[in-house]
Image (cartoon, rainbow, N blue to C red):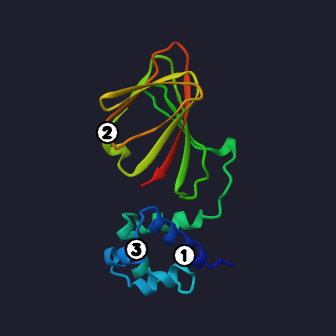
Amino acid sequence: MTSDPTDAIATRVKIERETRNWSLSELAERSGVSKAMISKIERGEASPTATVLGRLSGAFGLQLSTLLALAEQAGLRISRADSQPVWRDPETGYTRRVLSPLNGSVLELVEVSLPAGASVAYPSSAFTFQHQQIWVTSGKLIFEEGDVTHTLNAGDCLQLGPPVQCKFVNATDAACTYVLGLVKR
């Protein structure tokens, strides 16, 4: 028996709209779906058609399948350590573990281990759609934020400024571990 996804879709549409700080009117204008219909969808009073969902997902810049997958995962609230996705950069040995439940939440926590002597650079575009904070949990991190260099020790936490080219550097002979707190803009 298939469960009705109306509530999950309602929650996901509202999360996507609020994450972008859009009013109902703004989403209506961007999607071509009436404000009244969006309101009914968000309250779970109407089940959207494929066409309406297509318009909403397009306004969010998401594929329809992505919007539906995020809605399906909405109930996941715990992320067990043994099932957290880990990615390892084959060039630097940098590892990135997604700590947060994979439910499309506004907040995402990521643990990074930067090996001794390694550095990783990112263009400003990597920071355009999110606010970030860096909390160093062990070791020492040099964080180059545009023309400004921050030296962060274990326990230090830095809130990033406007999007600029950044570089994470571990100039020591021991691994550095830090947690990124990411919030969608």
Residue bearing the label numbered 1: 10
Q: Nearer the viewer, residue 71 or 170?
A: 170
Task: Report whether 131 appears left or right of 139.
Answer: left
Residue bearing the label numbered 3: 56
| Residue for point 34% across, 28% down | 148
**Image quadrant occupied by the C terminus:** bottom left
Image x and y of residue 159, in percent: 46, 39
Frontmost of labels 2 and 3 is 2
Image x and y of residue 28, in percent: 36, 79
Q: Residues within 10 Å of mark 1 (few under 14, many from 20)?
A: many
| Residue for point 59% across, 72% down | 8
Look at the picture and state if 37 lies above or below 3: below
Disc 1 and disc 2: Cα gap in Å?
35 Å
Task: Report whether 68 appears left or right of 91.
Answer: right
Disc 2 and disc 3: Cα gap in Å?
30 Å
| Residue for point 56% across, 86% down | 45
Residue bearing the label numbered 2: 164
Image x and y of residue 99, in percent: 60, 44
Q: Amino acid at mark 3?
A: Leu
Q: Amino acid at mark 2?
A: Val
